[in-house]
Each structure stands twice: as structure tokens, then as C-alpha cells.
Amino acid sequence: MTENGRFSLSSAELETFHEQGFIGPFDVYPEEEMERILRELRPKLLDQSNAAFANPKSLSGNTNLSSYDRHLDVPFLDAHIHRPEIIDRVRSILGDNLLCWRTEFFPKYPGNEGTDWHQASNFANVAGDKRPQIEWPNGSDFGGTITVWTAITDSTIDNGCLQFIPGTHREMNYDESKEMEYQSASIDSLEKDGVKRGFFGYDYRQLQIDPDWRPDEAAARSMVMKAGQCIIFWSTLMHASHPHSGKTQAMRLGFAARYVPTSVKVYPYSKKLSEFGGQADLEKHACVLVSGSNEYGHNVVINSTFKK
């Protein structure tokens, strides 16, 4: 039975979530506190000496892997993935026994492209060995993860906020077992219907089940958020982001924490990551138990890297 917490979703909120595939935004930090946190966080992020993926081997001079899983070496981020404003709500969706299996920073600078429309069920789409990075019980072909995307800075249409197409989380439009070729030269250079949209060096259209299918962008909703707010969504929801228009010189920064039940296997077939133009060993990776108990033995699980 799922425990009720101060920030648990109400029955009406749960119904909305299951209908549209996302819920929020919710306040996690006061806006002025988030500004202070970011100032204190910057030097800690520059120090990668204890990072899980410190200085990953770059295949092309560009890699996002160094921004992965910094909750394993930065105390604030570890505390963040445990925040009751987040965990109570995720527990309402997935149950009491929860793992945080991955976190990522998503910066967007003036002139950067928007992230193209995409879905993720098992995250095999960019894996070097094309095997699932998460696997739900009984080898389910459809699962996904709950992503909690926190705005570290204000997130607006002008600086590249998220976009969702409500109700698209129940059916995959992409085949994650298909090949998607990494091309670093395509970063910030692809245009789709007159809008700069890419996927960090990949073209997500290569995974489409129906090559002639196109997302219904007319149904898209822009997720404008204040610094310190979070939004919760299924990774299988069609999601994207606007380009950074350059009308402001301020960076947009988001931090995504990804949660699954403890029954889900994490990196069950991989000993390293090979994606986004980089390679890194998984030897320092561990899932963090953020709620309940872990009765399974198929993941490396810790409660926290830091003493509470």
C-alpha cells in the first residue's frame, strides 16, 4: 500500500496524471533560494574528480556524459533527489519502493537548438550495444521511467522550455531497437519545419515506426516554469523543447531525476555507456533507494553516498 505524505498527489491529480502523462509544475524551492543554490553549485559541478562519469572518453569532441549522475558526488543533488516534494508525488504514481537510477543536467544556451520530439521506454535508442538500459519485470517491452524535471533557472518559451503532447504516453511511436546514427556536426544545425530541432547529435526520426508519421504539434503545450519548480512526466510521453531564441543571454538549466520501482533492472546488459559521442564505465554507478525497501538483488543499490 502506498504511504501518504504531505505532498502526495490527490485522487484528482492522479487522474489528471494518468490521462495526460504529466502533472505540475510544483514548487520545490523558493525562487530566490534556487538562485543562491545555483551560485553555490557551479564550482562543485566544475570539480569532476569524484564524478561517476568523470572525463568520459569522447569519440567526437562532444559528450553529455559528464553531466550524468552528479547526485552521486554532489551533496545538494543527493538531497534533491530525496526531497519529499518530489518523492511523495512519485510514490503516489509508482508505489513505496523507489530507486533513482539516473540524473542529468540539461543546459540550453543562446542560439541552441530545441530538443526534438521523442519518447523513451527502455532507453536503448542511444545505447552503444542497443540493449535496454532499464527493464521492467517479465521483460516488458513497454515501461519507461518517471522523470522529475526541475527548473534550476526560469524556463520560458524564449529560452527553451519543455513541450509536451498530452496523452501520448501509452503508445510508442518509435522503435528503440533501431539504429540511430550519432553526428556531432548536426548539433544546432538541423531544421524541421523551419524550427531548429535536434537530439544532441542524433535524428530521432530515424527511429520512427512509421516513417511518414509526424507529431501533432498543434496539440503541444509549453511548460513555462519558475526557477525552483518541478514537473513530473512519463518518459514515454511525447516531449521536446523550444530552441533558445537568444532574446535573453541567460542560460536555461534543468535537472532531470529519473525514478523506477525497485523491481526494475537498471543497465542489465551493459558495463559501460556509449552514447552522445562519449564512452564511460558504469563501475561507479549505483541506484539510490529513495523510498521504501529493496527486496531485489539485481541492481547495485545504496541509500545515499553521503551520511545524513
Image (cartoon, rainbow, N blue to C red):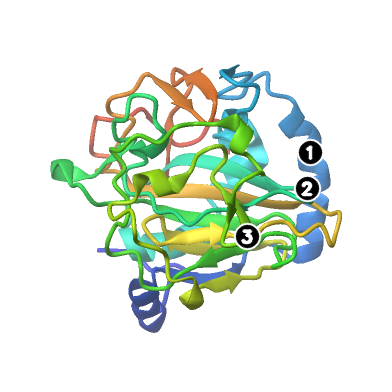
Helix, strand or loop at mark 3 = strand
Amino acid at pointer 1: Arg
Identify the residue shown where x is 24% and y is 30%.
297
Q: Is residue 230 above or below residue 296?
A: below
Q: Is there a contact, CB below 8 Å, between mark 1 and mark 2?
A: yes
Residue placed most toward the observer, 218 or 194: 194
Of callouts 1 and 3, which one flags the residue occurring earlier in the amino acid sequence?
1
Q: Which residue is mark 2?
A: 38
Report, in whole angstroms, how far the alpha carbon at label 1 lies from the one at label 2.
6 Å
Identify the residue shown where x is 33% and y is 53%.
211
Residue 28's quadrant in the figure? Answer: bottom right
Q: Which residue is mark 1?
A: 42
Q: Which residue is mark 3?
A: 195
For the question of whether residue 35 can be seen, the reply is: yes
Identify the residue shown where x is 54% and y is 31%.
183
Foreground mark, 1 or 3? 3
Compared across the picture, whether 259 is left or right of 256 comes to: left
Report, in whole angstroms, how far the alpha carbon at label 2 lies from the one at label 3.
30 Å
Helix, strand or loop at mark 1 = helix
Q: Is there a contact, CB below 8 Å, between mark 2 and mark 3?
A: no
Identify the residue shown where x is 63% and y is 21%.
50
